[in-house]
Image (cartoon, grey):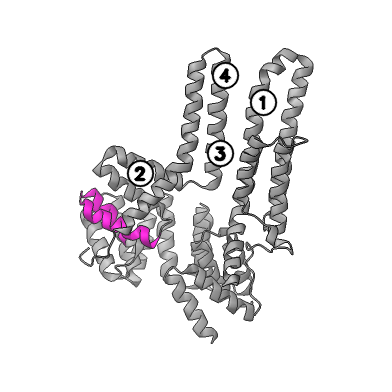
């Protein structure tokens, strides 16, 4: 029964139904809190939900229970990567590779980490190692596509992205890569298709929203800037958003007061109205942007030609 | 059937029905002073006290952090007030001139503190809300 439930939890996770997966895992952990596998898969779900603190806690428990499971180290590396602790992430990947020399996930993660550190030769070396083990996996093909796209070789990037999508048409990273490549080749319709597909599968993807905004800019620069601005604002962390809001409040109001004290009443009034416009925009503009995005995505339909 | 508790899930107290969405407290802090004059400088400390209490009733995993932020906010507001009194003692004219600026900075400090606590409390509140909906089903 537990094996069946574990399989169900894994399936929910791969399909993106993280709440359902967590529900099943909580039942499994209530029966058996000493299973590092359950804690590890729970950590993966928590990472997908951006609950990093809880994910770290689950990984700590799992590693205490069994430090010989490679996937726990790769999951830990993902957490470190999200926290921009690249060197610790690399160490975790090396721990995983020490346990399983041919751990594809660790190799691909190292490729990603080296790219973040701008160490492209080391990134390619890890990627080549992964490709020797699984040359036709979607993740490996996508990683090659990203490598060639980054170095400006669009032709090869397109070939790899096409192969990746043949291998798994539903993969979000492959679709995102294809969207970026198509945009760089001025194929707007195809780029828009892949951007929308990625956003529907992963609504929190900043890269997909940025791609969609870039596509809008391509069609109309003014509206495109509006899309770009709103996608940046809606992706701000709460802390940054709060600091910007309070900073704007202090700036506008102190300036309006100082200008008024200097005797420039009209300019002070204009500044006060600017602050009012800013506040109204934060209340109205972002929800309007989200409604526009939802409306654009409503028109999307899956097309196997792409 | 007992369930496993994830570390960032709230552990609501017996009074969990009194828990409100922290954003509601933020709105109340914005709107209530427009219509009512709260006694004993209530405009500044009442929203902070309410949101800290909300965190404890919710069983927020970050309730200690939220309380410390509220205390830090109160200390900041107190220091600003003390600075104004000190300025008044030195130069009354300058203090009168500074009052409108003091009010703006005071409100900025209050809402920065409130927003920070709302930021920490929103995540456990949304989990609490989700679990409540699940139990209702």
Q: Is residue A263 visible?
A: yes
Both labels 2 and 1 in a single chain:
no
Q: Secondary structure at mark 3?
A: helix
The x, y position of residue A124, in whole percent, is: 35, 58
Instruction: Residue under label 2, please give it.
Output: A227
Which chain does tag 3 point to? A
Q: Quadrant of residue A32?
A: bottom right
Instruction: Residue under label 4, please give it.
Output: A258
The stretch drawn in magenta includes residue A177:
yes
Q: Which residues are magenta?
A: A175-202
The x, y position of residue A259, in whole percent, is: 54, 17
Which chain does tag 1 point to? B
Magenta part, dominant SS: helix
Front-most of residues B135 and A168: B135
Report the Cα–Cα distance between label 4 and label 2. Answer: 34 Å
Instruction: Residue under label 1, please give it.
Output: B102
Circle 4 packing at 10 Å, graded few (<14), some (14-19), many (20+), is some
Badge 3 or badge 4: first in the primary sequence: 3
Instruction: Residue under label 3, please give it.
Output: A243
The x, y position of residue A173, in whole percent, is: 35, 60
Report the Cα–Cα distance between label 2 and label 1. Answer: 37 Å
């Amino acid at each position: 029964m537990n094996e069946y439930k574990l399989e169900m939890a894994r399936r929910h996770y791969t399909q993106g139904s993280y709440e359902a997966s967590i529900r099943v895992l909580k039942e499994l952990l209530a029966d058996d809190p000493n299973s590092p596998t359950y804690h590890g898969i729970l950590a993966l779900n928590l990472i997908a939900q951006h609950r990093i603190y809880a994910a770290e806690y689950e990984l700590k428990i799992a590693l205490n229970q069994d430090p010989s499971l490679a996937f726990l180290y790769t999951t830990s590396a993902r957490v470190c990567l999200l926290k921009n602790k690249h060197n610790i992430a690399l160490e975790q990947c090396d721990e995983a590779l020490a346990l399983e020399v041919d751990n594809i996930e660790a190799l691909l993660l190292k490729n990603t980490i080296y790219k973040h550190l701008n160490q492209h030769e080391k990134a390619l070396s890890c990627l080549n190692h992964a490709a020797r083990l699984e040359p036709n996996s979607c993740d490996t093909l996508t990683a090659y596509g990203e490598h060639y796209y980054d170095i400006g070789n669009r032709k090869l990037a397109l070939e790899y992205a096409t192969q990746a999508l043949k291998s798994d048409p539903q993969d979000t990273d492959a679709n995102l890569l294809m969207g970026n490549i198509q945009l760089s080749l001025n194929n707007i319709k195809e780029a828009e298709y892949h951007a929308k597909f990625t956003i529907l599968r992963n609504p929190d993807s900043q890269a997909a929203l940025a791609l969609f905004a870039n596509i809008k800019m391509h069609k109309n620069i003014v509206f495109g800037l509006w899309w770009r601005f709103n996608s940046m604002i809606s992706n701000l962390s709460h802390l940054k958003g709060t600091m910007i809001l309070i900073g704007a409040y202090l700036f506008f109001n102190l300036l309006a007061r100082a200008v008024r004290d200097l005797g420039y009443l009209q300019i002070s009034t204009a500044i006060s109205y600017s602050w009012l416009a800013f506040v109204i925009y934060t209340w109205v503009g972002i929800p309007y942007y989200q409604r526009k995005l939802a409306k654009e995505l409503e028109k999307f339909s899956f097309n196997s030609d792409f | 059937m007992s369930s496993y508790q994830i570390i960032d899930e709230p552990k609501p107290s017996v009074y969990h029905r009194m828990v409100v969405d922290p954003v509601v407290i933020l709105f109340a802090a914005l709107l209530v002073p427009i219509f009512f004059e709260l006694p004993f400088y209530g405009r500044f400390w009442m929203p902070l006290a309410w949101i800290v209490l909300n965190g404890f009733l919710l069983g927020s995993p970050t309730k200690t952090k939220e309380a410390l932020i509220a205390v830090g906010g109160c200390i900041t507001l107190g220091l600003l007030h003390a600075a104004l009194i000190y300025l008044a003692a030195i130069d009354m004219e300058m203090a009168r001139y500074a009052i409108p600026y003091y009010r703006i900075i005071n409100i900025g400090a209050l809402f920065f503190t409130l927003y920070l606590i709302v930021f920490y409390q929103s995540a456990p509140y949304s989990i609490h809300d989700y679990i409540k909906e699940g139990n209702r089903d």
